[in-house]
Amino acid sequence: MNKPVDLPIAAARFDEDSNCSANPTFDAVLDARLSRRGMLRGGLGGALAAAFGSLSLAACGGGDDDPAPAAPTAPTETLLGFTAVAKSVADAFTVPTGYTASVLIAVGDPLFAGVAAYKNDGTDTDYDKRCGEWHDGMEYFGLSAAGARDDASNTRALLGINHEWVTQAFLHPNGPTAAPRPAAEVDIETACMGVSVVEIAKGSNGKFAYVQGSPFNRRITTLTEIQMSGPARGHAKLKTRYSPDGTKTRGTINNCGTGKTPWGTLLTGEENWTNFFARNAGDNTLRTADENFALTRYGRAPGAAHAYAWNTVVSADDKYARWNTSVTGASTDGTDDYRHEINGQGWVTEIDPYNPTSVIKKRTTLGRMAHEGAAFSKPVVGQPLAVYMGDDARAEYIYKFVSTALWSAADANATDRMAVGDKYLDSGKLYAAKFNADGTGTWVELSLSNPAVANYTSYRFADEGDVLMHARIAADAAGATKMDRPEWSYTNPANGEVYITLTNNSNRRAAATGSQQPLDAANPRAYSDVYGGTTVQSGNVNGHIVRIKDTGANPAATGFSWDIYLFGAESDADPKLVNLSGLTADQDFSSPDGIVFSASTGLCWVQTDDGAFVDESNCMMLAAVPGQIGDGGPLTLTYGSTAVTTQMGKKPTPTTLKRFLVGPVDQEITGLAETPDGKVIFVNVQHPGGDTAAANIADPSKYTSHWPGNAGYGAGGATARPRSATVMIVKDNGGRIGT
Ligand code: FEO
Ligand code: CA
Ligand code: CA
């Protein structure tokens, strides 16, 4: 979710900024011609893009499996062969000419048999049986015709879809009721979040549709029982009235980035969960100094409010009381209240999508933070697995987990997938990244084996489970580098380099004071930009993308090399301090967030979640042909008497970076899954119309978006309430996406 630089999206008020530690803040064009098996047919892209807004959907046609006429010559395709989509503020989803986009599934669509069609007028209920809200990270899990796992399937699959927040205004007939909240409204909102697992299958028209009533369909919500796993399982700081032995909790919250394990399960990252826990004023007087330090470091000072006031429902039902993480009972261990409830969130949670009744587990080895993506190193037999992760808040860190177990190829296809998760994800070491100015870096260990952690005086870690539960504090102690809001991570399948988006940081300054962060080599920009003609935004306004590679391509290495792949910027911005990547009007972007590599084409897809450039264009997705670390060189930026030297990747060219799509108004583009053949991709549109004021719910003319109703999807038409949705994109000539 975008909680940046001061845009009035409803949740922007939850921007977290709780890291007050004293840590340093730290060519050739690739040969783009590839042969492929498919037959090219029809004309290649023209100058106009194909929008699917209010009128154009009917003009879109053609599935990707239509029979192709015989081609006279051997087919070739060119990566980034499409014509760039122009920046746009239209309320439409626009893809290049020669491509077709259509909605696959939107919030509220029924997942199970017997559930009514979505009315989209605020009166729908039963969201635990419908597709959730605020679609985010997403993974594709192939299914055979017989219903077994089949990683190669291009025709049948399960999608695992994260649901991050809700737009309250559109979920109720007249918007949300103020606190004390009615139980019925809260029951809707709590059921809208979490994860959807939904079957999709290609029909006779060659297009995917989701399968209502599939036995694989599953909704995991904020109330689903989940087991704690790994070193923190059973920890004293996880004991609650619901789980007196600290071994389980309810729900997964604010699910943002995803990961896919080499054994075929979904990892879902819990991001801004802290905002879902109220804490009473005066609760600090009932807590130890360490408890107060930890709660504040994770954004819950006394008096903190719940984002949606779920805790204010007047009811004896624990499912509401749990959202207040204060001391309310008389016990000394917390087994009679929910003082520890907040510690049950903030983890990477593993789900086996192929087994709708399987136990779900929070893998505590991966640390507790505002999790985004979880990117695996390329599995190598006999080596450990590494998982690379970002913690999205200003001045937070990049992390790496290294498994104790060494990779065995047989585990890739084991049938008890959660047992494989136990093997690789319940034991290992957690590290945080420290970037050096010379293009090297160090993974600093977060454990009591590190004296800086063991001897930290601001917070006394009780044990290794406590270190994981408070990984941010351990990273403070270990001297990791404060980054410009680390978002998603993804491993380039071609060379194992890990790309991590740093979306922006309104607190970065050349001359930092107070809670601001000074420049460093890995976070080298601070500048001002005008938004909407008058508003000045400052800091690292547009974000950048860093890439790292472990020394010797060894996932267990404690050293790495790095550079900055791309700097977000407006194309007309100062080329010496802002538009360092030399972006053109076909390439400029702001606030990179989602990042995914295609396993088919090798393209790097970059998605934006922005509040700095949306006066000129809605959020978007770009396609890139990536290079490698070191393909650029050192670059020194001069700010008055201050100079900062960074490591910069090779600048993109028109054939290595190009805008592929622009979404509707007030949304972010997020999540990307593809069929193994690369011919269908799925992307999510999250919170279209999200800036609509709840006070305007009775007047559709004041909604900032009507998508996808205005594109002909679902009820409501041109005045519909907007809906988060998964969009399917195909190339009309049957080719791979991005060519
Ligand atoms: Fe949910 Fe930081 O993106
Ligand atoms: Ca995001
Ligand atoms: Ca601007």
Image (cartoon, grey):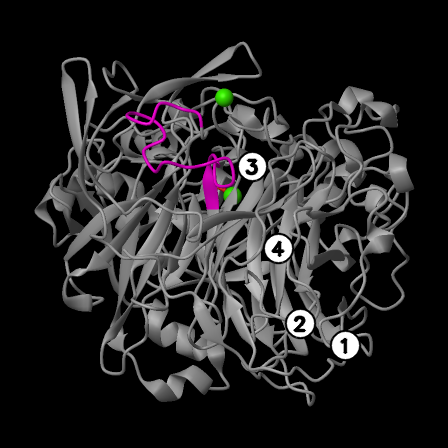
* Front tag of 2 and 3: 2
4 or 1: tag closer to the N-terminus: 1
Q: Position of residue 519 (x, y in %)?
A: 23, 26
Q: How far, Cα to Cα, is label 2 from label 3?
A: 45 Å
Q: Tell me which residue sits at (15%, 46%) in the image.
A: 439
Helix, strand or loop for disc 1: loop
- Judged left or right of residue 460, residue 179 is right
Q: Position of residue 316 (x, y in %)?
A: 70, 40
Residue bearing the label numbered 2: 734
Residue lying at the far front of the rendered structure: 72
In the rendered image, residue 582 lying in the magenta stretch gets the answer yes
4 or 2: tag closer to the N-terminus: 4
Residue lying at the far top of the rendered structure: 534
Disc 3 within 8 angstroms of ligand 1 (CB): no
Residue bearing the label numbered 4: 683
Amino acid type shown at disc 3: Phe
Q: How far, Cα to Cα, is label 4 from label 3?
A: 27 Å
3 or 1: tag closer to the N-terminus: 1
Q: Tell me which residue sits at (69%, 39%) in the image.
A: 664
| Above or below, 585 relative to 195 | above
Q: Position of residue 143 (x, y in %)?
A: 63, 81
Disc 1 within 8 angstroms of ligand 2 (CB): no
Q: How far, Cα to Cα, is label 3 from label 1?
A: 48 Å
* Front tag of 4 and 3: 4
Helix, strand or loop for disc 4: strand
Q: How far, Cα to Cα, is label 4 from label 1?
A: 22 Å
Residue bearing the label numbered 3: 276
Residue bearing the label numbered 1: 66
Instruction: Tell me where the magenta segment starts and ends, as one range.
Output: 572-593
> Tags 2 and 1 in contact by the CB under 8 Å rule?
yes
- For the question of whether residue 496 can be seen, the reply is yes
